[in-house]
Amino acid sequence: MQAAIYETYGPASVVELRDIPRPEPAEGELLIRVEASAVSTADWRLRAGAFPRGMWLPGRLFAGLFRPRRKILGTDFAGRVEATGAAVQNFRTGDSVFGFSGSGGHAQFLTVAADGPVALKPLNLTPQEAAAVPFGAVSALVFLRDVAKIRPGEKILINGASGGVGIFAVQLAKHFGAEVTAVASRPNHAMLQDLGADHLIDYKTEDFSHSGQTWDVILDTVGATNWTQARAALTPEGRYVPLEFGLGSIFRALFVNLRGGRKFRIAVSGDKPEDVRLIAELLASRKLRPVIDSVHPLARIRDAHLRVETRHKTGAVVVAVAA
Ligand SMILES: NC(=O)c1ccc[n+]([C@@H]2O[C@H](COP(=O)([O-])OP(=O)(O)OC[C@H]3O[C@@H](n4cnc5c(N)ncnc54)[C@H](OP(=O)(O)O)[C@@H]3O)[C@@H](O)[C@H]2O)c1
């Protein structure tokens, strides 16, 4: 099979297309023929070794100290079940599925645990649309529901609202009954209004922290804010939730949270199977929809990496794996 392989950290050019043996599913696994995948910000960070400030060592210990431990990137996938391991009962050959693979989506085949973060693909989505969902939607779900603990009627400001996580954070915050202020550059405002944003701020011309307004939750998906700015714009019981944070923020959060009042919440999102299934239901009932920035064939996956590392994509950068 063809796969995009990287054996060393570096620029997009370290990713090479190679022919390698097809994986075999273990007893409890599915073999997926991948139709589409995505290059997420996580894939870019792992390929470039681009970890936030102070996180180089933890990042490298996770990904491989001197060279990448897993050589095929691609957290998100959509495709068909090609074969099932002997113990699999919940999926059948031919099922159209999507989900998280941890890695391996940038290849023609991958294996995934049948009881892992994989679900039947909603019929109303193409494989490319479904591949544009898992990383952004599950991260947004976990950060809003479990970390920010958003409640109906609360006011939330989402910074980086047009990015891979942001477009789902806007839709899910509305789904949870919040009033949403989306911060994005002006060309993305119409799209965000269409996704449900109540108010819009152009970060290029307006600083939300000097607007005189306050929010119950400030969710920052791009690492463009800090505690001092956020604190000034939080209600007395407000929560600041940055998705991108360095070592300094972790210590700051520990210190801030010793006191009562405003909270500084640091967390990492998971990949629970039930969350992927919930996202699948919301997609099927059209309460959630993906936004695709661009689609690149597997043979030109380096272009997808280059687009992601600009940090100016809108939604997801998709990789078309099937011919
Ligand atoms: N902690 C965790 O577990 C976790 C989980 C998921 C993701 N993350 C991290 O969260 C981050 C977000 O990922 P993502 O995929 O959503 O990012 P992304 O797609 O790369 O974000 C790009 C978007 O950010 C906007 N943007 C750029 N600079 C901005 C600024 N100064 N102010 C406001 N918006 C700005 C861009 O809009 P314009 O083009 O209009 O500028 C673009 O639409 C990544 O660093 C990722 O590693 C962490």
Image (cartoon, grey):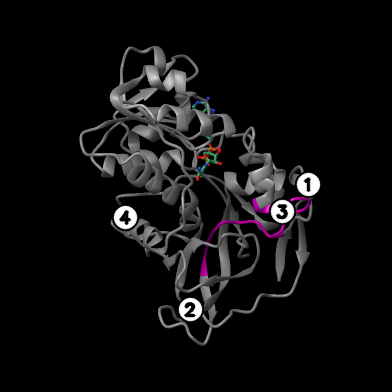
- Looking at numbered disc 3 in the image, what kind of residue is underneath it? Gly
Q: Position of residue 149 (x, y in %)?
A: 31, 41
Does label 4 or label 2 sit earlier along the sequence? 2
Give the mark toward the camera: 4 or 2.
4
Mark 4 sits on what residue? 282
Give the mark toward the camera: 1 or 3.
3
Give the mark toward the camera: 2 or 1.
1
**C-beta proximity under 8 Å, tags 1 and 3:** no
Span of residues in magenta: 62-79
Mark 2: secondary structure? loop
- Looking at numbered disc 2 in the image, what kind of residue is underneath it? Gly
- Looking at numbered disc 1 in the image, what kind of residue is underneath it? Ser
Mark linked to residue 64: 3
Does label 2 or label 1 sit earlier along the sequence? 1
Give the mark toward the camera: 3 or 4.
3
Q: Is residue 145 above or below residue 16?
A: above
Residue occupying image coordinates x 51% and y 72%: 113
**Gap between marks 1 and 4 measured at Cα:** 37 Å
Q: Main secondary structure of the magenta part?
A: loop
